[in-house]
Image (tube, rainbow, N blue to C red):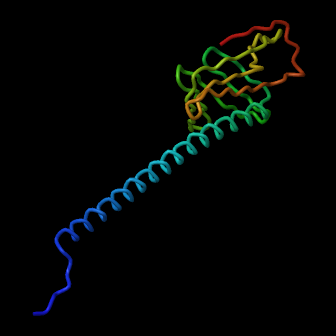
Amino acid sequence: MNKVKAFTVMEVLINILLTAIIIGMLYFLYTSFIKQISMYQSSIKEQNELNGFCLQLKKDFFKAGKIINSGNTFKIFFYDTKSVDYAITENYIYRKQNGRTDSLRIKKVSKNWILTPKTKEQLVNALVIETMLFNKPVNYTLTKDYQSIKATDNTNGN
C-alpha cells in the first residue's frame, strides 16, 4: 500500500485562516491609505481655494484706484475704468466681475474706511478677513494707502 502525501483538513483550515488574516490586514491598510489620500486632497483643495481668493483680493487692492464702501458691499475701481464688486454675507464673501462670481467661506469681515471731504465717499483703507483653514482660524489683513486723498474724518466700521 502506497502512502499518499497530502494535507490534512486541519492544515488546510489553518492555511485558510492565516490567508484570511493577511487579506484582512491588507484591506485595512489599503482603506486607511485611501482615506488619508482623500483627506490630503481635500485639504490641498481647501488651501488652494483660500490662497487663490486671497491672492486675487490682494491684486485687486494693489491695482485699485479707490475702494468704495457701502454697507455689506464694497466696490473696487481700477485706474483703467474697470471695477469689481465684493459682497459680504454672514458666511461668505463674494467677488463679482464680468458675470463671474467667486466666493470664500468666512467667519467675519471687518472694514476700516476714511471719509473724503469733497465727495463724502467712504474709502476702504483696511480689510480683515477671518476664515478657517484646516479647522483653525486664519486672518488675512489688506490695506490700501490713499496718498493723494486728504481725509478729514476717520471712521471705523464692520
Q: Measuring from the top left, give residue 82's x and y in whole percent.
A: 71, 34
Q: Measuring from the top left, give residue 104's x and y in whole percent.
A: 57, 32
Q: Is residue 37 above or below residue 64?
A: below
Query: Residue drawn at (53%, 19%), measured in percent from left and top?
Result: 90
Q: Measuring from the top left, give residue 99's x and y in whole percent.
A: 56, 37
Give the farthest residue toward the left. Answer: 1
- The quadrant in which residue 130 appears is top right
Question: The C terminus lies in which quarter of the figure?
Answer: top right
Q: Is residue 96 above or below residue 42?
A: above
Q: Is residue 17 above or below residue 63?
A: below
**Of the pair 42 and 48, the residue shown nearer to us:** 42
Q: Is residue 117 above or below residue 25?
A: above
Query: Residue drawn at (65%, 28%), measured in percent from left and top?
Result: 138
- The quadrant in which residue 44 appears is top right
Answer with left or right where residue 151 lies relative to residue 6: right
Query: Residue drawn at (80%, 25%), measured in percent from left and top?
Result: 144
- The quadrant in which residue 83 appears is top right
How many dots with numbers?
0
Give the farthest residue toward the bottom. Answer: 1
Question: The N terminus lies in which quarter of the figure?
Answer: bottom left
Query: Residue drawn at (39%, 59%), measured in percent from left and top?
Result: 26
Give the farthest residue toward the top. Answer: 153
Q: Measuring from the top left, give residue 93's x and y in whole percent.
A: 58, 27
Answer with left or right where residue 26 lies relative to residue 131: left
